[in-house]
Amino acid sequence: MRGLTRYLPVLDWGRHYDRTTLSADLLAAVIVTIMLIPQSLAYAMLAGLPAEVGVYASILPIVGYAIFGTSRTLAVGPVAVVSLMTAAAIARTGAEGEAALAVALVLALLSGLMLLAAGVMKLGFLANFLPHPVTAGFITASAFLIAGSQLGNVLGVKLSGDTLIELGEGLFAALGGVNPVTAAIGVGTLAFLFWARSRLKPLLRRLGLGPRLADALTKAAPILAVAVTSALAWGLDLGSQGVALVGSVAGGLPPLTLPALSLDLVRELALPALLISLVGFVESVSVGQTLAAKRRQRIEPDQELMGLGAANIAASFTGGMPVTGGFARSIVNFDAGAATQAAGLFTALGLLMTALFLTPLLAFLPKATLAAMIIVAVLGLVNLRILAQAWSYSRTDFAAVALTILVTLGAGVEAGLVVGVLVSLVAHLHATSRPHIAEVGHIPGTHHFRNVLRHEVVTDPSLLSIRVDERLYFANARFLEDYLLTRIAEMPGLRHVVLLCSAVNDVDLSAAESLLALNQRLKDAGVTLHLSEVKGPVMDKLAKSHLPQALTGKIYLSQVDAVRDLAPSIAPPPLQGVA
Amino acid sequence: MRGLTRYLPVLDWGRHYDRTTLSADLLAAVIVTIMLIPQSLAYAMLAGLPAEVGVYASILPIVGYAIFGTSRTLAVGPVAVVSLMTAAAIARTGAEGEAALAVALVLALLSGLMLLAAGVMKLGFLANFLPHPVTAGFITASAFLIAGSQLGNVLGVKLSGDTLIELGEGLFAALGGVNPVTAAIGVGTLAFLFWARSRLKPLLRRLGLGPRLADALTKAAPILAVAVTSALAWGLDLGSQGVALVGSVAGGLPPLTLPALSLDLVRELALPALLISLVGFVESVSVGQTLAAKRRQRIEPDQELMGLGAANIAASFTGGMPVTGGFARSIVNFDAGAATQAAGLFTALGLLMTALFLTPLLAFLPKATLAAMIIVAVLGLVNLRILAQAWSYSRTDFAAVALTILVTLGAGVEAGLVVGVLVSLVAHLHATSRPHIAEVGHIPGTHHFRNVLRHEVVTDPSLLSIRVDERLYFANARFLEDYLLTRIAEMPGLRHVVLLCSAVNDVDLSAAESLLALNQRLKDAGVTLHLSEVKGPVMDKLAKSHLPQALTGKIYLSQVDAVRDLAPSIAPPPLQGVA
């Protein structure tokens, strides 16, 4: 992609649009629209916002993404984890009702601007600082929080809280006030949806339906639940029996809204907006990459930032809430055959129609139905295997996942995410500050030098060859110095030390100074210091320091050369045909 | 060192104490005491505290260090940079007079407890996170701030401020009020001390004095300045002409003080105390290590934390202020022949005598003399070459030094130190998140594989050998994936990719997942992924993931083996005498 096309992917796919693509995109749009109607209401409810906000957030934001985004199949809109984070951010400001809506608009605007700025500055790589196990742990814990928060709606009691403890206490206190009719609808829907998820498709197949139709009907199970429970609520007048219904949903075109920016609000929402942007971006890019790879397409992370930024800014001006690319709906879009971003545009059209004409039908939808839908959807995000996987892989990774899950559950989404990232960074710095250092010896009959503790090797008492498995920088420079000074004290016959630098990927100024000091101390002890296998970029830097002049020994291209020169008795044989 | 001796080094050196050591220690103590008397007054003044506080801080703290510290020649007491940081911390609380003294005691206690706790937890390695260039830049900038702050005393005007701008403005505004007599004494002393530092010793040598005596007299120049200006102030009654004198110094034994701990004060002083501890520890350990190495002794950083902790706690209970091992006085102690920590004990005794009997003599000492002494001393700490050195070495190191200096000068010591460390950490993370990746080829006639861009190598179009020069972890896992997917798109004839892992020092769970994804994507593209030269500890971890089973290719012990197997036409010849 070149020039303008790079920044406006719509110019690329729009130019080659044809009838085949159109029909594929239209079909996908119909399916996704049907799925999105209840989902968008549900996630608005999860964020503590009026139901129509979810619908508005699924119209213009999709258009914004379709113009600037690079994934052809990503479906943008409110998603579970981001909605939970939105709820937490709103709770932090203490806003309710209309004010909560205003906070959601500011959040979407801030998040959109941050994403856009990050895109312009090509900061897409920052998403890499969210480690995979932390993301998995965070999403798992968030799913539990979301499911917990929706139990109130399922049982017909008021329940709020940002942590599992608050939710648990709230639920316990509210158990006496359970509305039996609501609970019947909620638990019934929950049971039906769980059953449908695992059993409906095999059943339909046994009834003789084709695999595609069976699959489509299975995915339509939530719609069936919506239709049946709405009809019950209407027919039996459940509203008068204390069953909470979605009620009148404001219809019509999305309103034009101006986010009410105030300095205090911006300061208060900056961190939540940043975290929402980060999580939204990571979720969206990982879905986008997975789907693109299946069709040998590629997405551009920096341009994705632009697409998601445009989507959130669009949300903030049309009565919406923070949005991102959703996992489940993007897969549905992909599986339904969406070929280009136009499928998104048609979905937006579908939701606009919904806003214009279908809202009266939604008035009788029980909130318990939406809550059950949310619970079933988010429990699909739970990945507890990551704990076992991390445990068996490394204690550090396990600590990061476990802490992320515990802090998210115990102190909320924002704290959980921040702690997870910080723990990972600190663990990385700690590990690199005490690098693995191996004494190496020669493997007879080869040109290889390996760890004396792991391989059968030969060494010479006058020569100590040390391989440092880390870039040398300020945090570990003195560690190497201490290690070597301790080692040489134990080796009276020692005359040469060779630092095998094949794994030394950088030497910063602190480490260069430290090597100079080490060189001097070894010199004082009558030991010569040599280097071998220094990489090109590292040698370029060292050449600018005093080290090459001050070094008591030599810098060898290879460890073989070093050993031939310093301890010929254990030197490897030459190659055949080489003098 | 074993058992109790490890934690009470006094048991080691105390047991072997004899008459030779005694006379060496006594001589050193006399010299250091003479040097310390004006210095301790000066650094108390720099911290904005009564003069006697500096003397008190040089008595019991020295005893505390002598019992617990491992350096035989380190001289502990108030030092310039830590005194400046103490002044900044006191200014932050807004305390003055008696209250300022109370803050200093709390600071010393907090710093002592932190050092002690760090020692117990063996956190000595944390000092490594203060990069050498940042330390050099910080001390240089602090020296300018200290010199600037003392210009007021030299000229006889009131001057305060935490940044160079504030000091400059204050000086400009105060220029009209310069006291000419004070300025004459101050500038005169300054000129004399600068002259003495560079010219006195050669002059004395030309006058026929022996080298040791000439050296000792040169070092006594500040004492001469103290004596002469005090005599002038007494004889000419300069106090009545507006010259600020030290005035009555409280004599007698150091008072027993109880630091007035309040939760608010602790919270406010926690960060300054932490930074004071860190800077004090780093300064002290680097002096201690340098001196110990000259005599083939070693110091134990974790035990040094204990020694400095004990010293600061002692300071907090005897009317003192934060202390650490000083550079200049330790070198004087060392050069004067101090053999054990007993030299410190005798110095403490000397200062106790001073407190008991000499304080009346100090009453006529002009503050301008002390200020001139401070300026000359701290300008010796300035190291502007570090800027040129860092610039030529690497832009990253330069950015860290330059920012540390600028922020310290412009926003104060605490901000400068924090920014310096953060910039270094971010630069490190950024560098490791975009690692150097080299395509390698075979150097004919050897068993070496090197960067195709730097060496004459042979390659095979069906084989791409990639060397990643970094541990693979969450921050760079996707970078490698993106790099390789871009590369293989350019190489239609490609069949094999070998990741040469000689410089891959770790693979965390995020990176292992990423390698699995890469393996799958390459498989989809008909390319086989192999690894070679995986280090032992890394292989141990990978063995716990699905990677070895899922890998489409093999894991080779060496790159030579990989090439022999995958591209025999460019394989290196075998070794002589090896089948």
Image (cartoon, coloured by chain):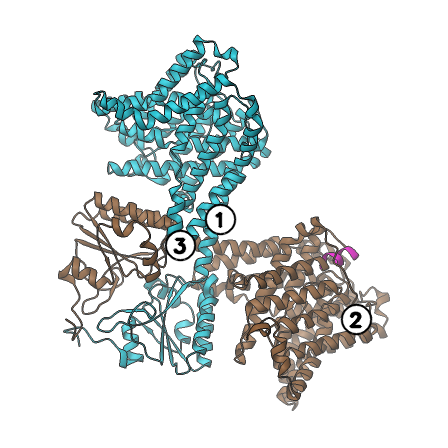
Chain colours: A brown, B cyan
Both labels 2 and 3 in a single chain: yes
Marks 2 and 1, how far apart at CA? 53 Å
Of the image marks 2 and 3, the number of the one nearer the N terminus: 2
Q: Is residue A552 visible?
A: yes
- Foreground: B578 or B210? B210
Q: Residue at x 68, y 61 (%)?
A: A108
Q: Quadrant of residue B495?
A: bottom left
**Chain letter of the residue beneath label 1 in the structure image:** B
> Is the residue B145 above or below the residue A149 in the image?
above
Q: Amino acid at mark 1?
A: Leu
Q: Amino acid at mark 2?
A: Leu
Task: Tell me if B523 is positioned left or right of B576 in this view.
Answer: right
The secondary element bearing badge 2 is classed as: loop
Instruction: Report the label total.
Output: 3
Q: Is residue A97 visible?
A: no
Badge 1 crowding class, 10 Å Cα cut-off, few under 14, some 14 to 19, many 20 or more, is some
Q: Quadrant of residue B365?
A: top left
Task: Tell me if A285 is positioned left or right of B197 in this view.
Answer: right
Q: Which residues are magenta?
A: A97-104
Q: Amino acid at mark 3?
A: Thr
Tell me the tag on residue A365: 2
Marks 3 and 1, how far apart at CA? 16 Å
Q: Which residue is mark 3?
A: A432
- Foreground: A492 or B73? B73
- Foreground: A183 or A561? A561
Q: Which residue is mark 1?
A: B422
Task: Tell me if A112 is positioned left or right of A290 in this view.
Answer: right
Percent position (x, y) of residue B235? 43, 8
Residue mark closest to the camera, 3 vs 1: 1
Image quadrant in which the N terminus of chain B is located: top left
The secondary element bearing badge 3 is classed as: helix
Q: Main secondary structure of the magenta part?
A: helix
